[in-house]
Amino acid sequence: MSVIETIIDIPAEHEKNVCGQFDSYLKKIERTLHVTMIGRDGALKIIGPEQMVQKAKSVFNNLIELSKRGNAITEQNVDYALSLSFSENDSQILEIDKDIICRTIAGRPVKPKTLGQKQYVDQIRKKMVVFGIGPAGTGKTYLAMAMAIQAFKNGEVSRIILTRPAIEAGEKLGFLPGDLQSKIDPYLRPLYDALYQIMGAESYLHNAEKGLIEVAPLAYMRGRTLDNAYIILDEAQNTTPAQMKMFLTRIGFGSKVIVTGDQTQKDLPAGAVSGLDMAIRILKRIDDIGFCHLTSSDVVRHPLVQKIVQAYDDYESKKKPAERKTKSIGGRKARYDD
């Protein structure tokens, strides 16, 4: 295999952004692609096997282009650009970056960062009901909130309704102090956090007083018909089948529904069936309902979160065959005893 070298010019104003602190991004590219990268005087020399050099060049050019568009390059950007370099979609990271949904109150653009997130956003635009299923950190709730707020600002819907089941995460909290709103607020805090970041606290409170934005536990949805609204059900893996059916039958004319959940993080009692799991099986053949399955590669939190999610996925995949084998042996033993 022939060893070649190539040189890329780095604009001085983008050098720190794309190389990382102490050249940490360059070192990550070197380790992953087995090339040598030497940055000096506004130029980057890449040395290594021809195929790997071309991949490294493509990754670095994509990072420079992202930086020119005003992005602060993160380790997640580098990791994702590297993963795409091993497929035929290495330039897709630039296409994804063009899709700006809205801006936060601080002016930061909210946009998909992976192909999975882009497909999720596209499904939301096209379908009346969308299920966003995936592990923690994949942006399921945040992107759904951004789409809802933008639709509300554009006058596409007259109100936003955000809901989630009020269930403890594996703990018994007992009686919480305060009035009813104080008791349910801790369960809904993640939704408030996203609202404040994208819309701003003052704007949210103003619209909430008018009843145009509602954050409520799932139990409050029974008996209602929700017309011309953007409705988001978060943490849907903690619903029962009856609750999920109740929620989905609230949909009125001109409404859009997004259901988000992580099938690996259920807080239901042992042995209880998740309404999300059942809905996926029952509704998967209905054309107007979209399903987007995000994976660990779509995690956009700290890179360590991606590694944690992947480690749990690997553990579960190894555990299932062992469980099936144990059940099979147990079944045969029972028949022998008979």
Image: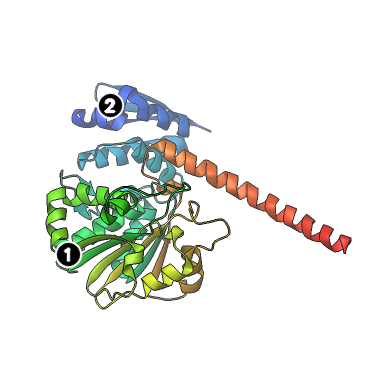
Residue 43 disc label: 2
32 lies above or below 188: above
Residue at 58% from the left image edge and 59% from the top image edge: 271
> How is colour applied across the structure in the image?
rainbow
190 lies above or below 303: below
Residue 211 disc label: 1
Residue 335: quadrant of the picture: bottom right
Q: Nearer the viewer, mark 1 or mark 2?
A: 1
Residue 330: quadrant of the picture: bottom right
Left or right of 27 in this view: 193 = left
Q: Position of residue 257 (x, y in %)?
A: 32, 68
Q: Which quarter of the rendered picture does the C terminus lie within?
A: bottom right
- Residue type pointed to by label 2: Ala
Residue at 26% from the left image edge and 47% from the top image edge: 193
Left or right of 40 in this view: 159 = left
Residue at 39% from the left image edge and 72% from the top image edge: 246
Q: Position of residue 326 (x, y in %)?
A: 74, 52
The answer, for residue 106, to whether it is visible in the render is yes
Q: Are marks 1 and 2 in contact (CB under 8 Å)?
A: no
Q: Position of residue 250 (x, y in %)?
A: 33, 74
Secondary structure at numbered mark 2: strand
- Residue type pointed to by label 1: Gly
Q: Position of residue 307 (x, y in %)?
A: 47, 39
Residue 291 disc label: none
